Amino acid sequence: MKIPEDIATTIVDPKAYAAEDPVQEAFTKLRRDIPLGIAEPEGFDPFWAVTKFDDIQEIERQNELFHNGDRASVLTTIEADKWVREVMGGSPHLVRSLVQMDNPDHFNYRKLTQGWFLPQNLRKLEDRIREIARTFVDRMAELGSECDFARDVAFLYPLHVIMEILGVPEADEPRMLKLTQELFGPADPEVNRTGEDVMVDPKAGFDAIFETVAEFMEYFNEMTEDRRANPREDIASIIANGEIDGAPLDHLAAMSYYIIVATAGHDTTSNTTAGGLWALLENPDQYQMLAGDRGLIDGFVEESVRWVTPVKHFMRTATDDAEIRGQKIAKGDWLMLCYPSGNRDEEHFDEPFKFDITRSPNKHVAFGYGAHICLGQHLGRMEMRVLWEELLPRLKSIELAGTPRRTEANFVCGPKSVPIRYEMN
Amino acid sequence: MSDKDFKTWQCRTCGYIYDEEKGDPDEGIAAGTRWADIPEDWVCPMCGTPKADFDMVEI
């Protein structure tokens, strides 16, 4: 069944994700009327919009039947897909990270760093992460009684943690943040590389993303040389010196590995941290409950992840004819996994539009599912838990001091500004 | 079997830990349920990985 044009246009519109209500209303209609339908927004190849929690899990679980890498793994216009293929020798991907890989490469490349991100290893890092969290809480206190929580804390804290793990010097963190925002916010003139509306000149917008990726690669190429000569205890050394089947990582895959850690490794956590506080302050009963019972911090973190769902979609391509929800999916079909929709699915969550830090169970799809489930999920949870453990006891009062705003983006999206007023101990 | 014998098992894909002592009540598995007593068709509640792809770990 075909999805009405206005809804199809909304679910790819960066501005609709920034406003959030339009896109959630569109998804609610789709879950009710066309839970799995074909969208054909202008400028895009047709794709299936997968809006139900169970369907997202069923597709992600079958990672041999639904590939990440056969077509673009994120929404791409027909024009941009053509430009990417021209530049990349026919490949639909500008980078080749875990997100664009299928087995056996995905398994082999993921295995290289998986150990770093398991709970038992992260436990060793917790004291250091707590030290970092404290410095940001102290900085918030030094700022007085008002700050932009997104800009002053939420963007910078996970950035510092992942850059230390990766091995990027602190002096380069602002550059890494800027490049990340350019990559994930290409449609938002406030954060993209050109400062222009990409709808006016899409080719200039594409060229800007290409320049951002090239700048990342130039930076990490130097880092590879350094770590090959002087290996350290960091992720960069693992990527630089790692081997797959007895050979070094191929160049594009190695550069892409650095890039995914240096971007997805903080931006998603930043979005969830800022969005979690925003939701908490709009729900004072939840804040009072949390302030009175720190045992609810884990629940607050999990509900923040569900609520914000910073990754808005990934695409899959059917490798063979398949059937989902009674619909025939043809080999080669492109499918959009709509995570914000799955995480508001009325058949899976009671009162899905209620921010509830006591929600239990709270099994969501914000980290994905199956073989491609987020590698950094345990780190993200730990960073947020530690920050709240440090910040909450210091707060005497806190409230919104303006209207928060989200980045205009249809892939990774969250708050870019959360103004707050507060008193601290 | 004494409480000391409780073991922990970890999903190779996502790192989820099944602790026999705690079980997973959210998933309908009572505290104290041994790994061997979990059905063979059970899958990781976080990522869907089959039971066979779990390793026993010491945490």
Image (cartoon, grey):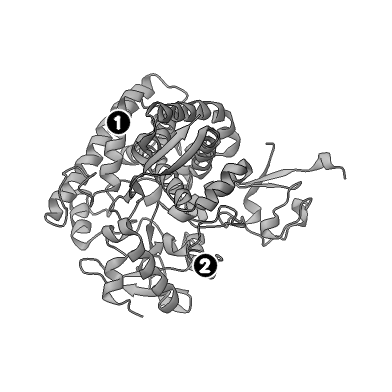
Quadrant of image for the N terminus of chain A: bottom left
> In front: mark 1 or mark 2?
1
- How many neighbours does mark 1 have within 10 angstroms: few (below 14), some (14-19), or many (20 or more)? few
Asked which secondary structure carries label 2, the reply is helix
Foreground: A387 or A74? A387
Locate residue B56: give its quadrant.
top right
- The location of residue A120, given as percent across then percent down, is 61, 35
Q: Amino acid at mark 2?
A: Asp
Foreground: A121 or B54? A121
Q: Is residue B15 above or below residue B48?
A: above
Q: Which residue is at the far right? A: B1
Residue under mark 2: which chain is it in?
A
- How many neighbours does mark 2 have within 10 angstroms: few (below 14), some (14-19), or many (20 or more)? some
Foreground: A316 or A3? A3
Disc 1 and disc 2 in contact, CB within 8 angstroms: no
Tag 1 residue? A174
Q: Which mark is residue A298?
A: none
Q: Is residue A91 above or below residue A178?
A: below
Is A177 positioned to the left or the right of A297 in the image? left
Asked whether residue A302 appears in the rendered view, the answer is no
- The location of residue A29, given as percent across then percent down, is 39, 74
- The location of residue A338, given as percent across then percent down, is 40, 63
Foreground: A280 or A385? A280
Locate residue A421: give its quadrant.
top left
Tag 2 residue? A54
> Quick one: label 1 or label 2, which is nearer the N terminus?
2
